[in-house]
Image: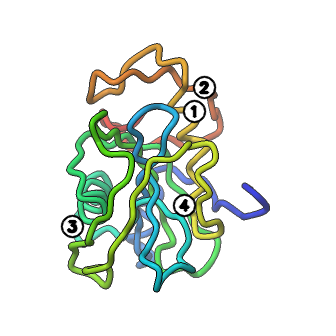
Amino acid sequence: MIGGVELGRLIDFDEARQAASALGWREKVLAYVTRSPGELLVLEHSPEFADAGVQVPAGGIDSGEEPGEAVVREVAEETGLVLAGPVYLESREWPTEAPSRIRHYFWLVAPAETPDSWSHVVRSKDGDDGLIFTLTFVNRRSAGLFTGHGFESGLRELECAVDEDESSTHPDTDRPVSEPACVLEDAPRGPGDATAR
């Protein structure tokens, strides 16, 4: 739990994909985009959707799409950033009858020259097309994410993946990051490819 909110059950990546397929559950990806180790990119909707709160880029996986592909697409659609090399953090089975019962969390790194804040018109094939998001890099430890919808659920694993120490580099850039700050020994691991930490 974070702030009294149930985070959903940690689930192995392959088990999550199989459950979604077998039970007809929609899968969702959530993106933790950092520009430096202490930052997190958050988005807010235009004033007419103020009750949507502070979120991270996220969305459903399209038919035939892999989660890593979906997170790159969602980030591009919702932020305008074209990023590569998503790092898988974890998967969760959501505890309620939400449209997206399986959620996969990824970490992506934005270039250092990315602005602190900007507005973006969403371009997608779904209901978000045309929405205007305000995007801002904030302190990742006090991001103020909207609770109860899973936006905050993978932050502990992100904390493990990103450390202020800056003793190594991100796998797809020369940007410094450290070894995990903690080890979640009982946490299920992700896909057996280079995108899993």
> How many discs appear?
4
Q: Residue furthest top?
A: 167
Task: Identify the residue at image location x=65%, y=38%.
Answer: 186
Residue on which the image places disc 3: 64
Q: Are marks 1 and 4 in contact (CB under 8 Å)?
A: no
The residue carrying pointer 1 sits among few (fewer than 14), some (14 to 19) or many (20 or more) residues within 10 Å by Cα, namely some
Q: Secondary structure at mark 3?
A: loop
Amino acid at dot 3: Gly
The residue carrying pointer 4 sits among few (fewer than 14), some (14 to 19) or many (20 or more) residues within 10 Å by Cα, namely many
Disc 2 versus disc 3: distance between alpha carbons?
Answer: 35 Å
Amino acid at dot 4: Phe
Q: Secondary structure at mark 2?
A: loop
The residue carrying pointer 3 sits among few (fewer than 14), some (14 to 19) or many (20 or more) residues within 10 Å by Cα, namely few
**Disc number for residue 160:** 1
Q: Are marks 2 and 1 in contact (CB under 8 Å)?
A: yes
Residue on which the image places disc 4: 151
The residue carrying pointer 2 sits among few (fewer than 14), some (14 to 19) or many (20 or more) residues within 10 Å by Cα, namely some
Q: Nearer the viewer, residue 139 or 24?
A: 139
Task: Identify the residue at image location x=24%, y=46%.
Answer: 83
Q: Are marks 2 and 3 in contact (CB under 8 Å)?
A: no
